[in-house]
Amino acid sequence: KGTQEANKSVTSKNIGAAMIIAILLGGLMYMIMFIAQIGILYPDKFFIYDIPFIAGLNNVTGNKIFRYLILFTASLNILNVYNDMFFGASRAIYSLSSLGYTPKIFSKINKDNQTPYMAIIFVSIIVSLAPFFGQFAFTPLVNISAFIYIILWGSTVFANLKIRKKENLSQTI
């Protein structure tokens, strides 16, 4: 139900504009951070610190609060990625189950809030057990997942371009 309501206001033009704005803003933020790092630390000191940006902020302000502030925001960013991937994985398993590619148990929906509770429980168990297997088992899984993620996004972009060319659609991505 929520997906159907959300899809009513989404158009290709809105998605394309949002993607372009997000890419431009992300690039701008990276440039600002890069220029800020260069401006606050001498070039000969840049490579002797583990985290040059924090060292530069400490040198400029004389205050170590930035070290904790940046570590705190980095921790929040990790939690954000975890949250996105957790819900993305559970929804992907639910969708695959709805299409018949994974066991049907994963397509069970909670009647109260319309969430795929069995897929969420499954992903929660996998994520909870992952730290107990250690870095030996977890690092190769992360590396393979990153590689597959790149292939997934690349194939999505190329498929979209091919469909647009085949159907002679003038609107860009």
Image (cartoon, rainbow, N blue to C red):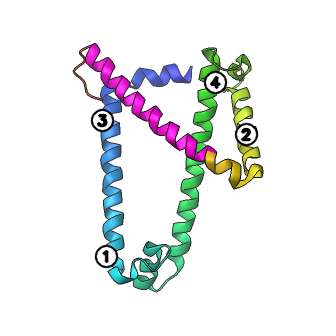
| SS under mark 1 | helix
- Name the residue at 50% across, 41% down: 147
Circle 2 or circle 1, nearest the eye: 2
Residue type (three-letter) at the residue carrying disc 3 = Ala
Residue named by callout 2: 126
- Name the residue at 46% across, 79% down: 55
Q: Where is residue 28? Give x, y as percent.
A: 30, 55
Tell whether 3 sits left or right of 104.
left
Circle nearer the N terminus (3, 1): 3
Instruction: Specify the label residue 39 is tagged with.
Output: 1
Circle nearer the N terminus (2, 4): 4
Binning the other alpha carbons within 10 Å of mark 2 as few (below 14), some (14 to 19) or many (20 upward) gives: few
Circle nearer the N terminus (1, 4): 1
Residue type (three-letter) at the residue carrying disc 2 = Ile
Circle 2 or circle 3, nearest the eye: 2
Residue named by callout 3: 17
